[in-house]
Image (cartoon, rainbow, N blue to C red):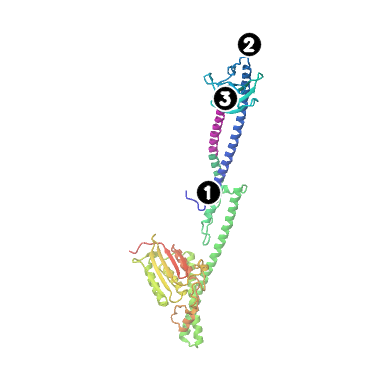
Amino acid sequence: MTPVPGRDWRNPATWHLRTRLVLVAMALLVAICGAVGVFSYASMDAFLTRQLDTQLEQASHRSSEFGRPSPEDAGRRPDPLEARGQGIGTLNARLLAGTVASAGFLAGDATRKSLSSDDNAVLLALTPNGVPVDRTLSAGDYRLTAVRAPYGDVIVTGLPLDEKQNTLASLVWTLGVVSAGGLVLIGLAGTALIRRTMKPLEQLSEVATKVSRLPLDAGEVALGVRVPASAAHPGTEVGSVGYALNQMLDNVSNALEARQESEMKVRQFVADASHELRTPLTAIRGYTELMRMTEHFTPDGEKSLARVQSQSERMTTLVEDLLLLARLDEGQPLKVTDVDLTQLAIETVSDEKVMAPDRLWQLELPEEPVVVRGDATQLHQVIANLLSNARKHTAPGTKVVTGVMRSADGSAVITVTDNGSGIAPEFLGRVFARFARADVARTNPAAGPAARPVRSLEGTSAVATAAAASEGTSGLGLSIVQSIVEAHGGTVEVTSRPGRTEFAVRLPAAPPLA
C-alpha cells in the first residue's frame, strides 16, 4: 500500500475515519468488558467469602463445643480437630495463657499435620473476637477466626482459601477468554459493518478525486462524473452530502458549458475578424508601395508614409498570428513529416544573426541529427519566436545559446538560453499568456527602445526603419510557441534569474531519417 502524503500513523488526527471508529468502538468494548470483569470478580469474591465465613463459623462452633474440658475425665481437653464434620484442610489450635497448647490441620490423607513455629506466632497474634481474617501459613493461605470459649480457652479455626482462589482464577480466565474472543468477533464484525456504512463516503471521495483530476481550466470539458444514486439520498447525512455534491457538479458543468460556448464564440470572432482584416491590410500595403513608387513626398510625408507601411506590416503579422492561434485552438491536423531539429536550429539562428549582428549567437548541437515527427513550418516558428523573444528583450552584446539534444527518455529538447537581465518573478507565471507583455521585465534599463534592433523592412527607407524601432511586441509570440508545442504533444517551460533565462521545449521522439 502506497503511503498517503501527510499521513502520520503516530497522529490519530490523520487516520482514516473508519479506523478511528473501529478503534473507538473497540476501546469502549474493552472498557465495558473490563468493568463487567471487575464487577463479576468483586461479586464472586464477596459471595465466596460470605460462603467461606459461614462454613468457618460452623467449624469454629463445632471445634469450641468439642474442645470443652471433660469433668468426667479430670478436665482433659479434647483435640478440636477430632470434632465431627471437620473437612480436609481444616486448621484448629488451642491457645492457653499466651501459648499454643495444640495446633494442626487435616492433610489430604485425613491425617493430622503439625504447624511450624512461625505458624504458631501467626496464631498467637490473632485477636479472639470471632472476626475472620486471611493469613498465609506454611500450609497455604487460610481464612482464620479466633474465639474465646466459655471455658476460657482461645480456639482458633481456619479453612483453606485454595478453593476460593481457584474459583476466582477460573472466573478470571473465563472472563478473559470470552472477552478476548468477543472483542475479536465484534472487532471483525464492526470493521465490516463500519466499512459498509462508510462506503458512500468513499464513493463521494472517489467522485471528488476524479473531478479534481479533470482539466477544467481550458478546453471542452465533459463533466460526467456523479455520485451514485445509492449515496445521494437527501434523507441521510451522507446522502445529503452526496446530493449536494451532485447539485454542485451540475452547476459547475453548466458553468463550464457556458464558458466553453463563450470561448468558442470569441475564437470564432477572432478568426473571422482576422480573416476579414487580411484583405484591407493587403490593400493598404499595396497602395502604400504604389504611392511610394509613383508619387513624390516631402520629408514629413515620406516619414508618415513609412509609418503607415510599418504599422500595416505589424498589423499583418498580428492578424497572421491570431489566425494561427485560431487554427491551433480548433485542433486542425498538422502536416506531419520527419523534421530535423538540428537543421532548423542552424537555419533560424543564421537568420537571427543577419537581423541582430550585435548579439552573440551560439549553437550547441549533437553529432547526430535529432529528428521528430511534426509540422516543419510550425516547429520553425517555435524556434524563431523564442529567438525573436530573446532578441527583442535583451540588450546588445547579450549571448544567446540555442541547443538541441536528445534526453535520456528519447524525447527531443530544444533550449534557448540568454544571459540577459532575466524575467521579473511576478511576470514569470504568465509569460505564455496571450497579449502578456512586461515592458521592463526583460529590457535592459540602460537601453531604451531606440537601442533595440528592428527587422529592416524590404523596400523601406531609413526613415521607415527608424520609425519601426519604436514598435512594441504583440504579446502573442510565446503563446504561439506553447500552442504549437502542445499540438505536437510536447511541453515548454521557462526558468529565469538575473543573468540567465532559459526556455526549454520538449517534443516526443521519432525514428531517425532513413
Res. 347 image quadrant: bottom left
How many residues crowd mark 3 within 10 Å: few (<14), some (14–19), many (20+)? many
| Residue in the image at 59% along x and 54% along y | 247
Farthest residue in the top direction? Answer: 72
User: Of the numbered discs in the image, which one, if any, rests on residue 397?
Assistant: none
Q: Which residue is mark 1?
A: 10
Q: In this orientation, does residue 37 appear?
A: yes
The disc labelled 3 sits on which kind of residue?
A: Asn
Nearest to the observer: residue 473 or residue 41? 41
Q: Main secondary structure of the magenta part?
A: helix
In percent of width and height, residue 410 lies at: 38, 60
- Decide which of 69, 295 is in the foreground and name it: 69
Q: How many marks?
A: 3
Position of 124 compared to 272: left or right?
Answer: right
Can you tell which mark lies on residue 72?
2
In the rendered view, tell whether residue 442 sits above or below residue 253. below
Boundaries of the magenta span: 164-186
Asked if labels 3 and 2 touch by Cβ distance under 8 angstroms, the answer is: no
Q: Is the C-beta separation of discs 2 and 1 under 8 Å?
A: no
> What is the secondary structure assignment of the residue under circle 1?
loop
Residue type for callout 2: Glu
Percent of width and height locating residue 352:
41, 75
Where residue 28 sits in the image (x, y, percent)? 59, 41
Q: Is residue 325 above or below residue 213?
A: below
Q: x%, y% of residue 166?
A: 55, 28
Which residue occupies the extreme left position in the image? 514
Quarter residue 161 falls in:
top right
In-image side of 137 versus 418 (left or right): right
Tell me, for residue 120, which label it has, or none.
3
Please tell me which residue is depicted at 60% across the width and 51% down the height of the picture: 241
How far apart are the alpha carbons under marks 2 and 3? 30 Å
Judge depth for marks 2 and 1 and give the one in front: 2
